């Protein structure tokens, strides 16, 4: 892993420890911070995660304004807009680290588990994207959410030449993670 990605990852690990221990240290959440960044941003990492209201990257990683480029959508299902947003972070903002994070009690995973293998009546794009890794053996939707991060990582690389090239050149790391609601801990899976 390159030095920039390593530092970014360590900073996320440390920030999450702060969150778990109830000692948040981030000060850069003021208008002053924003003013200092009004002509540009250089976030240390991109976090691709779910829109779930309980999953708030800046809070759970103890980060502030300008620290994270966050890409969110329900289930963090990788469609064209999501993919291009991650590409933007890597190609334009030179972010060295992408975190692909899923979480406990995800509504999309739950819906997929409950609907499978029927044709979903609504939210078809989201639900059917999870179908590709689901089977009758899959025990619970939290396990599904965890497994799904690997599919997402592969999809990012398969569908994006920008990400593939950066990854191959060692300029980009993609790390999978899972956010637990009972402890607030982010478990890194790679
Ligand atoms: Zn979710």
Image (cartoon, grey):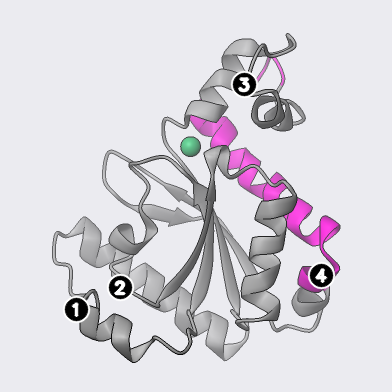
Label 3 – label 4 distance at C-alpha: 29 Å
Instruction: State left or right for residue 172 relative to residue 25.
Output: right
Q: Which residue is mark 4?
A: 164
Spatial separation of the CA atoms under disc 2 and disc 3: 34 Å
* Residue 140 visible: no
Q: Earlier in the sequence, mark 3 or mark 4?
A: 3
Between label 3 and label 1, give the one nearer the viewer: 1
Q: Compute the Cα span from label 4 to label 1.
A: 35 Å
Q: Is-magenta flag for residue 137?
A: yes
Q: Nearer the viewer, mark 4 or mark 1?
A: 1
Question: Under tag 2, what secondary structure?
Answer: loop
Quadrant where the C terminus is found in the figure: bottom right
Q: Residue at x 62, y 86 (%)?
A: 2
Asked which secondary structure carries label 3, the reply is: helix
* Secondary structure beneath label 4: helix
Task: Give residue 30's position: percent from left, percent from top.
Answer: 21, 77
Determine which of the numbered discs, if any, sits on residue 112 in the image.
3
């Amino acid at each position: 892993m390159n030095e920039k990605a390593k530092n970014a990852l360590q900073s996320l690990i440390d920030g999450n420890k702060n969150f778990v221990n109830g000692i948040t240290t981030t000060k850069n959440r003021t208008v002053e911070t924003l003013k200092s960044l009004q002509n540009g941003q250089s976030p240390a990492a991109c976090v691709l995660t779910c829109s779930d209201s309980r999953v708030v990257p800046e809070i759970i990683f103890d980060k502030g304004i300008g620290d994270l480029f966050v890409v969110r959508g329900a289930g963090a299902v990788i469609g064209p807009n999501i993919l291009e947003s991650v590409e933007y972070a890597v190609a334009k903002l030179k972010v060295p680290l992408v975190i692909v994070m899923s979480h406990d009690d995800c509504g999309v995973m739950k819906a997929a588990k409950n609907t499978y293998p029927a044709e979903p009546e609504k939210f078809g794009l989201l639900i059917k994207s999870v179908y590709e890794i689901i089977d009758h053996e899959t025990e619970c939707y939290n396990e599904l959410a965890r497994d799904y991060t690997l599919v997402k990582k592969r999809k990012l690389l398969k569908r994006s030449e920008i990400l593939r090239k950066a990854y191959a050149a060692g300029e980009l790391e993609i790390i999978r993670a899972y956010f637990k609601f009972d402890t607030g801990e982010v478990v890194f899976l790679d």
